[in-house]
Image (cartoon, grey):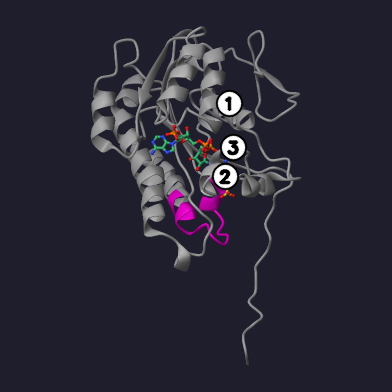
Amino acid sequence: MTSYLNGLLTAPGAGMLQTLPTTNHCEEQSMTSTVFITGATSGFGEATARLFADAGWKLILTGRRKERLDALCAELSAKTEVHGLVLDVRDRKAMEQAIANLPAGFDKLRGLVNNAGLALGVDAAQNCSLDDWETMVDTNIKGLMYTTRLLLPRLIAHGRGASILNVGSVAGNYPYPGSNVYGGTKAFVGQFSLSLRCDLRGTGVRVSNIEPGLCESEFSLVRFGGDQAKYDATYAGAEPIQPQDIAETIFWIMNQPAHININSLELMPVSQDWAGFSIDRSVKG
Ligand code: NDP
Ligand code: 8X3
């Protein structure tokens, strides 16, 4: 379900009451815009791809799972032009090659959604696997870094109205047991987003970081190694945010008037808040 109808763009959030006219929303509306979305084979990335397709944007979609990517590209091709790239964001050479060789018609970019990412495990640091830590760093930090650096020239060439939307997390803002390296990678995303804004001064390119809390997606299956019971327990009774909610938030941020930059946007389901400081009461006097 999309939340914009007949030229009306709706502010983010479910059950929206407030509608905003698209007129003057962005000077670029009249052009066909292209957005590059990493991690479009499930969750936020897939929902975001669908929403931008409904709005007529051209899509460059990436992910490692070819079958899923092919199916999505085929489906969305009925609505817009789509270019699929089976890519692992950790593979710098493959990223360089794919981005250098974007086909005509997809080589001018207005938007980048740096979404591909993952968490592996919730073990205490002293019990974690270094391999898992490296995978999170390579994906959430280095993959995002490669994508951003390689696409920056195209976004700068677009200039005013272009935007980079990074997907951070509440885990980058607040520590919780087992967030260790995952939280660290998302803190990087937040600080990198702010720093990018400084470097892009004068280019017209905007940078935003969304920081979602509990959202229902394959994220938790990946995090718990495919354990469906842990997945179910994570979301039970919590009414978590859905990928469609995130897609609408991303769409709203990237379609703000060209003179506005949403620096960061943190969102949680109403059911989630902060547990408060924890205290170890086993300390012997
Ligand atoms: P999903 O697991 O549903 O989606 C993750 C996407 O990232 C998939 O499309 C996956 O595709 C892609 N991906 C993972 N690793 C790589 C890689 N090495 N190269 C290319 N693509 C990769 O999870 P979400 O949609 O929930 O997560 C999207 C982002 O949102 C992540 O950055 C996550 O950290 C963040 N986030 C998630 C929250 C949640 O509670 N769900 C909350 C806050 C932030 P494929 O496997 O095909 O490569
Ligand atoms: C995912 C949200 O709270 O599991 O980034 O870290 S959380």
Foreground: 72 or 110?
72
Please indicate whether residue 238 sits to the left or right of residue 102 in the image: right
The residue at label 3 has a CB less than 8 Å from ligand 1: yes
The answer to whether 64 appears left or right of 175 in the picture is: left
Distance (Cα) linking label 1 and label 2: 26 Å
Q: Which mark is residue 217?
A: 3
Q: Position of residue 45 (x, y in %)?
A: 51, 29
Q: Position of residue 154 (x, y in %)?
A: 31, 23
Task: Residue 233: give x, y in percent of width and height.
Answer: 68, 49
Comparing marks 3 and 1, which lies closer to the viewer? 3
Distance from the alpha carbon under mark 3 to that under mark 1: 21 Å
Give the amino acid type for the residue marked by disc 2 in the picture: Ser
Looking at this view, name the residue that lies furthest to the bottom.
Answer: 285
**25 magenta-colored:** no
Type of the residue with mark 3: Ser
Asked whether residue 53 is in view, the answer is yes
Would you say the beta carbon of the disc 2 residue lies within 8 angstroms of ligand 1?
yes
Magenta residue span: 169-185
* Pointer 2 with pointer 3, Cβ within 8 A: yes
Instruction: Name the residue: 48% across, 18% down.
Output: 71
